[in-house]
Image: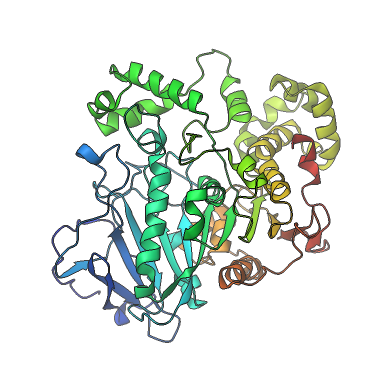
């Protein structure tokens, strides 16, 4: 059994359990300083034998409630004594998210702006290890930094201090509100990264050697930060897994917020929205962006044409330009970037429709999504292998390509000569058929033994694949090249993780099949 925790300092709140210790018999408490006070974490394992310390739920800003609900993040108040950092802090995600591909629990409470730090050298201020900061996904409306998959144990083993951060979600984080700061969720990212700059040396990390990484909306977040002038001093390299950009126009954001206000029965102002309980707005925010058309495909077309409804907004201030345009103009050009996707991010969504779609020609199905004739002909020609798997597979791949895979090419091309490496994750799940969304995450974190992994990766996921992609991540974080030729040196060059045994690991034009969409 773990020893009974000592009393917590004032201001802490209970949350879910800390990550389990590799050897609970050796669990002990460790402490480190922050600029606002001392924190107490847990050491997992024997010192010097691959163990690490976990400091959980450390606030980087005050709880965004009351007068601070729609405000930019405000630094936390200092505390006296030692504050327990033994359990995950509150999450912006509320309630049971249901069965998801990544286990991301919700933690109740108001103090949702917090960080988790995993380090092999707690309190050793002169170690200066490279730092990884992870931003979770969830479409900018869900997700949690408290996932067991995001435990930094493997990166700690490889000499990398790891931080996972929280941020406000959905309307609270990204909705337009007259009289309130824009892009509050983005401001949360910046505040958390500033916390890392101010504090990570006390956990053995080097604030001048920070890599930001994320998956799905988290991948979109790190690309957005790469393209933001205000963020450039906060990190030195980027890895984007399946990056989902939002780049919501100000007009679209205003329209969605006005509709949400009508649904809630209030004025579309800060005062109006503040009068509505958080859970009410959360329940209405998806309805506020649903298409008003009765056409069942209207929502799919909206996603393909306009992207995600909640997320970073082009506000002309903090976020002055769309991501691709900013990258094309040279933003972040001094920072190495690795980005890629799984081969069939969302193809599994249409698996249940295979029988219904088997007699409908793929070209006809794409026409229903308003794909122009010339484009669909070229797309089907470039995706002949997928076409042989049936119309459902083609439609799923098309959605995957528009939302995720074409972004890789657009970003890499926009960066020009800036150091950029591109990859694909091609290993198909033995339980879910496809190289699907989120499948790469446990390989990237090298956490294949975590119990939830088997549901998506089977009982015997290949260790060599984890070694390869995790090793590439560690190389980038340490300041080295990830291990294959850069796209910026030879456009199209792509590392394929988990491809067929007879196929080369690096191919000349790994995203050729999406060129018609770029």
- Where the C terminus falls, by quadrant? top right
Q: How many numbered badges does the structure rendering display?
A: 0
- Can residue 11 be seen by looking at this rendering? yes
Location of residue 238 with respect to 467 vertically, above or below: above
Name above or below for residue 173 compared with residue 453: above
Q: Residue at x 74, y 61 (%)?
A: 486
Which image quadrant is residue 35 in?
Answer: bottom left
Q: Is residue 483 above or below residue 323?
A: below
Residue in view at x 34 percent, y 26 percent: 178
* Image height of 174 relative to 135, above or below: above
- Location of residue 276 by image quarter: top left
Residue 202: x %, y % from top left: 34, 74
Q: Quadrant of residue 84?
A: bottom left
Which of 104/418 is in front?
Answer: 418
* Residue 341 x %, y %: 65, 50
For the N terminus, the quadrant is bottom left
**How far across and down, in percent of the image, does residue 235 sit?**
50, 61
Relative placement, left or right, of 96 versus 492 is: left
In front: 8, or 171? 171
> Taking 471 as reference, is 128 left or right?
left
Q: Nearer the viewer, residue 491 or 156?
A: 491
């Amino acid at each position: 059994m773990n020893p009974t925790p000592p009393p917590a300092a004032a201001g802490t709140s209970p949350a879910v359990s800390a990550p389990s210790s590799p050897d609970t018999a050796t669990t002990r408490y460790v402490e480190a300083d922050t600029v606002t006070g001392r924190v107490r974490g847990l050491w997992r394992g024997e010192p010097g034998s691959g163990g690490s310390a976990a400091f959980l739920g450390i606030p980087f800003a005050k709880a965004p409630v009351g007068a601070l609900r729609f405000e930019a993040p405000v630094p936390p108040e200092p505390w006296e004594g030692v504050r327990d950092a033994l359990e995950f802090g509150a999450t912006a995600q509320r309630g049971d998210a249901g069965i998801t591909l990544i286990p991301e629990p919700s933690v109740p409470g108001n103090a949702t702006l917090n960080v988790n730090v995993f380090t092999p050298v707690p309190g050793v201020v002169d170690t200066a290890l490279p730092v990884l900061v992870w931003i979770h996904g969830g479409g900018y409306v869900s997700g949690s930094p408290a996932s067991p998959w995001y435990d930094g144990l493997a990166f700690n083993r490889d000499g990398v201090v790891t931080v996972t951060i929280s941020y406000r979600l959905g309307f609270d984080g990204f909705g337009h509100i007259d009289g309130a700061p824009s892009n509050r969720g983005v401001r949360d990212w910046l505040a958390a990264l500033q916390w890392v700059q101010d504090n990570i040396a006390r956990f053995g990390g080097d604030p001048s050697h920070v890599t930001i990484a994320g998956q799905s909306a988290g991948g979109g977040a790190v690309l957005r930060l790469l393209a933001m002038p205000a963020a450039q001093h906060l990190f030195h390299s980027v890895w984007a897994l399946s990056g989902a950009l939002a780049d919501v126009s100000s007009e679209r954001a205003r329209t969605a917020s006005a509709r949400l206000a009508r649904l809630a029965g209030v004025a579309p102002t800060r005062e109006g929205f503040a009068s509505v309980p958080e859970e009410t707005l959360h329940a209405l925010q998806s309805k506020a962006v649903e298409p008003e058309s009765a056409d069942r495909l209207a929502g799919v077309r909206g996603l393909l044409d306009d992207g995600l409804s909640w997320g970073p907004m082009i506000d002309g201030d903090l976020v002055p330009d769309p991501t691709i345009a900013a990258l094309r103009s040279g933003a972040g050009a001094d920072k190495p970037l690795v980005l890629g996707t799984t081969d069939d991010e969302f193809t599994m969504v249409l698996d249940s429709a295979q029988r219904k779609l088997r007699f409908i020609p793929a070209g006809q199905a794409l026409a229903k999504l308003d794909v122009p004739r010339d484009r669909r002909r070229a797309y089907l020609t470039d995706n002949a292998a997928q076409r042989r798997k049936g119309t459902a597979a083609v439609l799923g791949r098309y959605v995957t390509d528009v939302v995720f895979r074409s972004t890789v090419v657009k970003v890499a091309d926009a960066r020009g000569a800036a150091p950029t490496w591109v990859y694909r994750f091609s290993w198909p799940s033995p339980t879910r058929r496809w190289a699907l969304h989120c499948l790469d995450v446990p390989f990237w974190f090298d956490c294949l033994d975590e119990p939830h992994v088997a549901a998506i990766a089977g009982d015997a996921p290949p260790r060599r694949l984890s070694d390869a992609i995790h090793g590439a991540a560690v190389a980038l974080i340490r300041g080295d090249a990830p291990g294959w030729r850069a796209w910026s040196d030879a456009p199209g060059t792509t590392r394929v993780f988990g491809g067929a045994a007879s196929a080369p690991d690096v191919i000349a034009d790994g995203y050729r099949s999406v060129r018609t969409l770029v």
